[in-house]
Amino acid sequence: MAKYKRAEEADEDLSYAEEMQQQQQVAEEGPPPADAEEASFKKRYGDLRRHSQQLMQQKDQELAEVKRQLDAAAKGQIKSLNQMRKWMIGLKSIPRLLKSLIRLLVRELTKLLKRVRKGWKV
């Protein structure tokens, strides 16, 4: 008579894929919680982690949108004199208005400088 006897395994007639899936489910669920407090802690922690991940995804999306807007705004800037000339040709009335404003400012500044120069005569 044998001193030790091997325990018989229950044969569930599961295929290899089904058995692996069952083991993965057990591994994902983890060991069963010891008490109700631990179970509620794990649930709360999971909810908080999921919420923080959602917030991070939202912030990443907002940041990407702001970067796209910044890139679009930077592409429209005038960076050289040639670009400015092309812009002035495309917009006929605005450059004329700017030129007239600049001429007016130059006239006013020259008048002011003449008055200051007269006051400083030595």
Image (cartoon, rainbow, N blue to C red):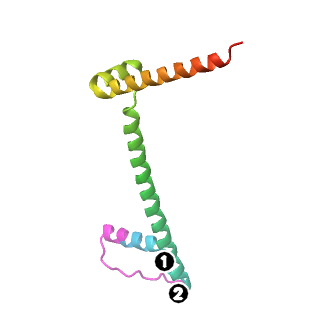
Q: How many residues crowd around disc 2 within 10 Å: few (fewer than 14), some, or many (20 or more)?
A: few
Mark in the foreground, 1 or 2? 1
Q: Is residue 24 above or below residue 70?
A: below
- What is the x, y in percent for residue 31? 50, 77
Magenta: main secondary structure: loop
**Residue 103 is covered by the magenta coloring:** no
Q: How many residues crowd around disc 1 within 10 Å: few (fewer than 14), some, or many (20 or more)?
A: few
Query: Residue 90 lies in what quarter of the image?
Result: top left
Question: Going 37% across and 38% down the picture, which residue do you hit?
Answer: 72
Query: Residue 77 lies in what quarter of the image?
Result: top left
Q: Of label 1 and label 2, which has the lower sequence position? A: 2
Q: Which residue is mark 2?
A: 36
**Residue 11 is covered by the magenta coloring:** yes
Q: Is residue 35 visible?
A: no
Q: Which mark is residue 88?
A: none
Question: Going 48% across and 74% down the picture, which residue do you hit?
Answer: 30
Question: Going 52% across and 84% down the picture, which residue do you hit?
Answer: 2
Which residue type carries mark 1?
Lys
SS at circle 2: helix
Return the residue nearer the eye: 32 or 112.
112
Distance between the alpha carbons at the discs numbered 1 and 2: 11 Å
Return the residue nearer the eye: 1 or 60.
60
Label 1 close to label 2 by CB (< 8 Å): no
Question: Going 39% across and 48% down the picture, which residue do you hit?
Answer: 65
Which residue type carries mark 2?
Ala
User: Which region is colored magenta?
Assistant: 1-21
Q: Is residue 61 above or below residue 46?
A: above
Q: Which residue is mark 1?
A: 43
Q: Is residue 68 left or right of residue 38?
A: left
SS at circle 1: helix
Quarter of the image that includes the C terminus: top right
